[in-house]
Image (spheres, rainbow, N blue to C red):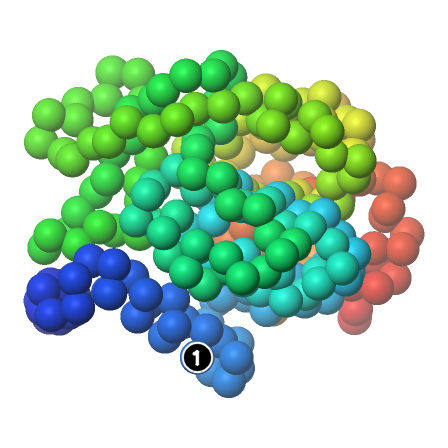
Amino acid sequence: MIGIIKRILTKVLSQQGYLKAMHRGFYFLFDLGLLKRDQRFKFHYKVASLIKKDFTIIDLGANLGYFAKNFARLAPQGRVICIEPILPFYTILQKFLGSYTHVELHNIALGEENGKVEMVLPESNGVIRTGLPHIVQENENVNAQKTIEVDLKKGSELFSSLDRIDYIKCDIEGYELIVFNEIRAIIAKHRPMIQIEIAEANIMSFIEYFDKLDYLQYGICNFKIIQEKGLQKEIGDFLFVPKEQKISFEENHLKP
């Protein structure tokens, strides 16, 4: 039934009209606090306590701006850099974040080299499934799927001129380990907090990655931030915090 409704809305509104409605609908419910008890949106609300007004924030996989717009409102004296390779999604970001002077939008994917890369656009009933576009993986059969070619850039070059990075949010559908290996020196230099969705196959590799960089692992359980080690108590984004921030972070965010 939901699929049929989506298809009808897409035909009536056009694809871009449907995506605009999704963005507007999300923020209408979000701003009213109606999503607070939904586990899927626990980080969307929790970032309000993590972000400071002058933070420089990087949003890798900004999608329709479900985090990016909130970041822009939380850090009006800072800087928000959004990376989104899918043109229909990027157009939505332009529509709703283009007026923010402290927000930068980049219609690219990040990778280990500069060039072009093929991405899969999964569809259901003719509608793009907004949370599932991804870079084509080695040996992946994409013959029956819609694909597009997008620009690929090295994050180490794109972010090289930044004088600070305070927070990175990452949701790039399984490509995160490649990107983070490429920007490792950037992470080591700026020591940002990192909120990241990790593909199951990459979890242990990422835990080792952040261990070597002297980061601590946290998560959200029962809508509270907790310290974790390894597999999560409650499925969701991982939060990695530099060890040198441990005392102040836990005083502010780990409450009995």
Q: Residues within 10 Å of mark 1 (few under 14, many from 20)?
A: few
Residue 128 vs residue 199, the one in the foreground: 128
Residue 86 vs residue 217, the one in the foreground: 86
Residue 218 visible in rendering: no
Q: Residue drawn at (28%, 27%), measured in percent from left and top?
A: 149
Residue 136 placement (x, y as % from top left)? 29, 25
Residue 60 placement (x, y as % from top left)? 52, 41
56 up-or-down from 28: above or below = above
Q: Quadrant of residue 86?
A: top left
Residue 252 vs residue 128, the one in the foreground: 128
Q: Residue drawn at (63%, 67%), measured in percent from left and top?
A: 73
Which residue is under mark 1? 28
What is the three-letter code of the residue carrying label 1?
Answer: Phe
Quarter of the image with the N terminus is bottom left
148 up-or-down from 94: above or below = above
The reply, left or right, for residue 57 in relation to residue 188 is left
Residue 107 visible in rendering: yes
73 up-or-down from 231: above or below = below
205 up-or-down from 55: above or below = above
Residue 234 placement (x, y as % from top left)? 53, 56
The reply, left or right, for residue 3 in relation to residue 101 is left
Residue 66 placement (x, y as % from top left)? 47, 61
Q: Residue drawn at (74%, 54%), measured in percent from left and top?
A: 78
Count of number-bearing discs: 1
The reply, left or right, for residue 246 in relation to residue 175 is right
Q: Secondary structure at mark 1?
A: helix
Q: Residue drawn at (44%, 31%), measured in percent from left and top?
A: 109
Quarter of the image with the C terminus is bottom right
